[in-house]
Image (tube, rainbow, N blue to C red):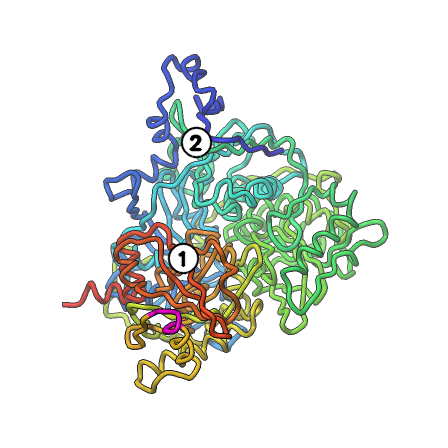
């Protein structure tokens, strides 16, 4: 059961919620009146943030992190960016994990080539290298790097360690490159929302059920967007540290910026268990803390839940779905098929023999592959069989220490003898690089996301799968019923969790830890697929862009902007990867953008302007505009209502830029990290209130744009030119930009910005 408070609240003594309108109660509870300014500084989030802020201004933050982390989809681009900008050593601990491109079957040697590049970089610059299949990125950082009061920056959107008292922030690679260059992570002071937990989860109800219930309540209304979720309340005590982390990692799907939890003896026990007692400290809000809102969660009212395709916010209880299967699945089909092109999702066919039937189960990654989740699944499956029908069950422990503990406790044997398959420590099922279902199949997953085609299907080739998110317990209950959807609360099981035995020696034997000692003589090891970033042009006085994609979906995910799956293997090759941009959403985007890019290359090389561009300039001149072809960059652009939900991957922006992209037009941006990625790659993130003035393949002219950005104007003139030569004037804005971001945009990208600063 989840409810939202209207407006801000005070939390008194960590227990009493006092709405702003009832602030006089605080005098009764504390003996002194409410002081909102003081209370605002009494959240755990602010105490951690302020300790990492170097600006001296509490409203304009310049943060430096305690450590950073990347995986093998992102670290090559980040290191290449920092190298090109003058980096000679890692100035903070930087963990390089290999858990995304660790199946070396796509593209020949290129995945393993990236791994060897990372190992050589760890030696040269002083990094921490975690070999393939040893741990997923977040399990490793929880086990070895998180600490109460610390902050970790990661180039993965699920960088969340709040349950361990450590604030994790997932961002695009440009922000990590800044830290590698000794620069700060800049943002306005974020709001903080209390997530107040009370009650206790019922047997069979797990952390994913709680997480989905929260996501379903706050996603659509943006209640916590770009804010910090601060978990407080008596309900925390009834959750294990593992279950807290499984809830915490899913806060990314609420679109919050970061998270933090109150710590207690359970947190202390977890750190002791992992051999790092010094990383623990008690963390709690002050006697009176102010929050910009409150999500009240009665854990005892949470039911076994399912998030239907194609978003974690499409939440129903499993019982509700079973009772209204025809209506709910029909609506889910309609919603999904409005987003899909060329294929049709069929969910109603999964209703048969009085039940709803799944074809595949996955328990994996930073959300599902925890020790507690897998032990719970084992307790339910002990002595049972998943059968030899269509249904399969695949399990991916988060780390080798977790797998070792499962083996020692006997729970691994329970899972295997029931027919489940224990796999390597790999994030593939979360993003479409492992266990892609057969065409038309329905997969239930304790992973992080079920975005369109994220499971690996290719609609352009007639393929479609359906993915729903569930908790490991209900997935195991479903598996025990041969794939018939079953709530774990409806079955008897052994829900006890054996003590976790952590073996630090597993990492000591294999992880290369070079922090604090560089080996500058070590050459970087390049594979044939590792390429430097192409040169990006600086922003000219004026800008002319062609809309090469026009997307009216409510939200456009980063998976749609640059798909995952086999495309991930090419993320060390900017030009090759750009071929995949929007390929599963708007297949004509790449050829259209390439055509525009060639127009600009011809202009810069002196080959003249095309007839199409000359016609655009004539139309503008006829409308009274003065044009200067020599001072006007020609680029491509996209319009999307709200782009950038989901992954932190910078390639969602860099691929646009490599293809000649210069601007985005949007009603709003789904996440700060995607907007930051656009800025760092020199793509102007325009906001447009009246998108009907532009359409597919229109040209948009933005006179005086460079000057407007540098002079901090936020009301920018624009003119749309239609195919018939008609011209419509309108206005766009950009929103809040730091001085550095303005310079990055006008310099053309982050790399150019640092080159200019380092120029003698």
Residue 692 is left or right of residue 444, and the answer is left
- The CA distance from mark 2 to mark 1 is 35 Å
Question: Whole-percent x and y of residue 20?
Answer: 45, 24
Q: Residues within 10 Å of mark 1 (few under 14, many from 20)?
A: some
Tell me if I can see residue 631 in this picture.
yes
Q: Quadrant of the C terminus?
A: bottom left
Foreground pick, 444 / 574? 574
Question: What is the magenta range?
Answer: 620-625
- Vertical comparison of 343 with 395: above or below: below
Q: Quadrant of the N terminus?
A: top right
Q: Which residue does the numbered mark 2 point to in the structure image?
A: 291
Residue 464 is left or right of residue 229, and the answer is right
Q: State the SS at label 2.
A: strand
Residue that extends furthest to the right in the rendered view of this protein:
353
Residue 694 is left or right of residue 745, and the answer is right
The residue at the point 41 percent across, 56 percent down is 675
Q: Quadrant of residue 734?
A: bottom left
Q: Quadrant of residue 297?
A: top right
Residue 755 is left or right of residue 749, and the answer is left
Q: Which residue does the numbered mark 1 point to in the structure image?
A: 731
Question: Whole-percent x and y of residue 489?
Answer: 71, 38
Proximity of marks 2 and 1: CB atoms separated by less than 8 Å? no
Q: Nearer the viewer, mark 2 or mark 1?
A: 1
Question: Whole-percent x and y of residue 468?
Answer: 66, 53
Question: Whole-percent x and y of residue 340?
Answer: 64, 63
The residue at the point 40 percent across, 14 percent down is 27
Q: Earlier in the sequence, mark 2 or mark 1?
A: 2
- Give me the disc on residue 12: none
Foreground pick, 386 / 440? 440
The residue at the point 51 percent across, 72 percent down is 589
Q: Is residue 39 in the magenta section? A: no
Q: Residues within 10 Å of mark 2 (few under 14, many from 20)?
A: many
């Amino acid at each position: 059961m989840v409810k939202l408070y209207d407006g801000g609240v005070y939390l008194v003594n960590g227990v009493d919620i006092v709405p702003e309108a009832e602030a006089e109660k605080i005098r009764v509870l504390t003996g002194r009146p409410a002081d909102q300014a003081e209370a605002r500084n009494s959240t755990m989030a602010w105490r951690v943030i302020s300790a990492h802020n170097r600006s001296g201004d509490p409203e304009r933050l310049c943060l430096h992190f305690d450590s950073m982390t990347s995986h093998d989809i992102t670290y090559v681009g980040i290191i290449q960016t920092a190298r090109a900008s003058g980096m000679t050593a890692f100035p903070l601990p930087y963990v390089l994990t290999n858990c995304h491109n660790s199946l070396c079957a796509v593209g020949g040697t290129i995945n393993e080539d990236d791994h060897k590049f990372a190992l050589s970089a760890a030696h040269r610059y002083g990094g921490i290298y975690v070999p393939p299949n040893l741990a997923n990125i977040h399990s490793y950082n929880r086990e070895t790097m998180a600490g109460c009061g610390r902050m970790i920056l990661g180039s993965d959107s699920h960088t969340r360690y709040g349950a361990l008292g450590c604030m994790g922030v997932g961002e695009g690679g440009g922000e990590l490159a800044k830290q590698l260059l000794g620069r700060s992570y800049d943002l306005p002071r974020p709001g903080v929302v209390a997530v107040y937990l009370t009650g206790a989860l019922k047997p069979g109800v797990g952390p994913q059920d709680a997480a989905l219930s929260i996501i379903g309540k706050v996603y659509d209304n943006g209640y916590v967007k770009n804010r910090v979720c601060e978990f407080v309340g008596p309900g925390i005590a009834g959750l294990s540290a593992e279950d807290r982390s499984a809830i915490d990692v899913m806060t990314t799907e609420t679109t919050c910026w970061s998270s933090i939890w109150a710590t207690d003896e359970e947190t202390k026990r977890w750190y002791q268990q992992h051999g790092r007692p010094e990383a623990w400290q008690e963390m709690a809000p002050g006697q009176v803390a102010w929050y910009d809102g409150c999500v009240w969660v009665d854990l005892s009212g949470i039911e076994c839940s399912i998030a239907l395709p194609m978003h974690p916010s499409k939440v129903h209880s499993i019982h509700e779905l079973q009772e209204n299967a025809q209506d709910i699945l029909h609506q889910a089909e309609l919603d999904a098929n409005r987003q899909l092109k060329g294929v049709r999702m069929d969910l109603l066919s999964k209703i048969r023999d009085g039940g709803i039937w799944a074809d595949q189960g996955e328990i994996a990654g930073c959300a599902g592959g925890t020790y507690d989740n897998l032990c719970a699944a084992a307790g339910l499956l002990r002595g049972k069989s998943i059968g030899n029908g269509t249904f399969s069950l695949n399990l991916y422990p988060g780390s080798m220490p977790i797998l070792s503990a499962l083996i020692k406790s006997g729970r691994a044997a329970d899972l295997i003898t029931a027919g489940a398959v224990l796999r390597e420590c790999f994030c593939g099922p979360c993003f479409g690089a492992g266990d892609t279902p057969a065409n038309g199949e329905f997969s239930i997953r304790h992973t992080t996301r079920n975005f369109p085609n994220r499971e690996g299907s290719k609609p352009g080739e007639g393929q479609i799968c359906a993915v729903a998110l569930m908790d490991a317990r209900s997935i195991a209950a479903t598996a025990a019923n041969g794939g018939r959807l079953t709530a774990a609360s409806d079955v008897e099981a052994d829900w006890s969790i054996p003590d976790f035995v952590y073996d630090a020696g597993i990492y000591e034997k294999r992880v290369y830890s070079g922090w604090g000692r560089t080996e500058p003589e070590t050459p970087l090891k390049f594979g044939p697929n590792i390429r430097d970033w192409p040169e990006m042009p600086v922003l000219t006085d004026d800008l002319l862009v062609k809309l090469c994609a026009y997307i009216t979906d409510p939200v456009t995910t980063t998976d749609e902007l640059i798909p995952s799956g086999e495309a991930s293997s090419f993320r060390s090759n900017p030009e090759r990867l750009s071929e995949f941009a929007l390929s599963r959403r708007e297949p004509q985007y790449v050829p259209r953008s390439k055509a525009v890019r060639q127009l600009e290359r011809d202009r810069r090389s002196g080959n003249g302007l095309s007839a199409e561009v000359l016609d655009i300039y004539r139309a503008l001149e006829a409308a009274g505009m003065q044009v200067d072809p020599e001072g006007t960059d020609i680029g491509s652009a996209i319009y999307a209502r709200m782009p950038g939900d989901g992954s932190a991957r910078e390639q969602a922006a860099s691929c646009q830029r490599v293809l000649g992209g210069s601007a985005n037009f949007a009603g709003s941006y789904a996440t700060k990290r995607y907007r930051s990625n656009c800025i760092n790659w020199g793509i102007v993130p325009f906001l447009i209130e009246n998108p009907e003035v532009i359409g597919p393949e229109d040209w948009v002219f933005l006179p005086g744009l460079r000057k407007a950005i540098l002079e901090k104007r936020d009301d920018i003139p624009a003119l749309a030119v239609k195919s018939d030569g008609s011209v419509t004037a309108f206005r766009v804005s950009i929103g809040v930009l730091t001085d550095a971001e303005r310079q990055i945009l006008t310099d053309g990208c982050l790399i150019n910005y640092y080159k200019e600063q380092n120029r003698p």
